[in-house]
Image (cartoon, grey):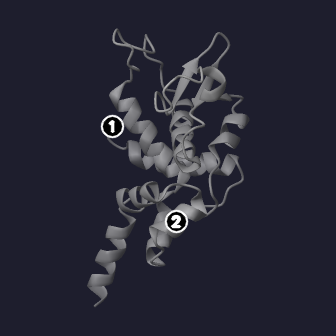
Amino acid sequence: MIRGFKTRAKALALEVREELNLDLMDPFDPYELAKLYGIEVVATSVLLPATAPKDAISGALVPTGTGTIIIDNDSEPPGRRKLTTSHEMSHVVLEHEFPAAIVDEQGCRTTIGDQEDEATFLAGELVLPYNAALKLAWRNTPDAVVARDYGISVHAAAWRMNASGARMLVNRSRKRRR
């Protein structure tokens, strides 16, 4: 990621949440954002034959003749789908370019490394902004409660609470006060 991206992405996430009339502590709905941007979300169960492996794809942003669609693996748990769709919408918000080919010679999905990292970071900020994670850390909110309140998996809640640095900052501050 380029220098300063994370700071800009944090501000951008708050702007996007504001477009959806969301407070800092409100749960984010990537499907509402897709609707706002006019992007159709299509379930894999509609696109793929019943014999296709359920884990073949989690999600993808796919160019169409008139725009883009998001493919959403509806066989995955809702929390995983929410984070995946947030990631795909982050590509849209960040106006990322599509790779020349969607799949490579081996049939694997092609990606652009920095763009994937940026979309992952922004998705995390959309779903659970840093300042919200900080408030939750000060309240000693368990990952399971964060997961429930934000509609994500416990694993994703732990990732956001830790990767955001909120818990570390709160723990350091508490140690200094002792």
Q: Amino acid at mark 2?
A: Val
Q: Secondary structure at mark 2?
A: helix
Q: Is residue 123 left or right of residue 36?
A: left
Q: Nearer the viewer, residue 98 or 81?
A: 81
Query: Which mark is on residue 145?
Result: none
Quarter of the image with the C terminus is: bottom left
Position of residue 120 relative to residue 156, above or below, is: above
Q: Position of residue 48 (x, y in %)?
A: 59, 21
Write the residue at 39% across / 66% down. Answer: 166
Q: Nearer the viewer, residue 136 or 148?
A: 148
Q: Amino acid at mark 1?
A: Met
Write the residue at 33% across / 82% down. Answer: 174
* Residue identifier under label 2: 146
Q: Nearer the viewer, residue 66 or 12?
A: 66
Write the residue at 48% across / 44% down. Answer: 122
Residue mark closest to the camera, 2 vs 1: 2
Q: Is residue 4 left or right of residue 43?
A: left
Q: Position of residue 159 (x, y in %)?
A: 39, 56
Q: Alpha carbon of mark 2 to alpha carbon of mark 1: how far? A: 27 Å
Query: Which mark is on residue 1?
Result: 1
Near mark 1 (Cα within 10 A), the count class, few <14, some 14-19 or many ≥20, is few
Q: Quadrant of residue 37?
A: top right
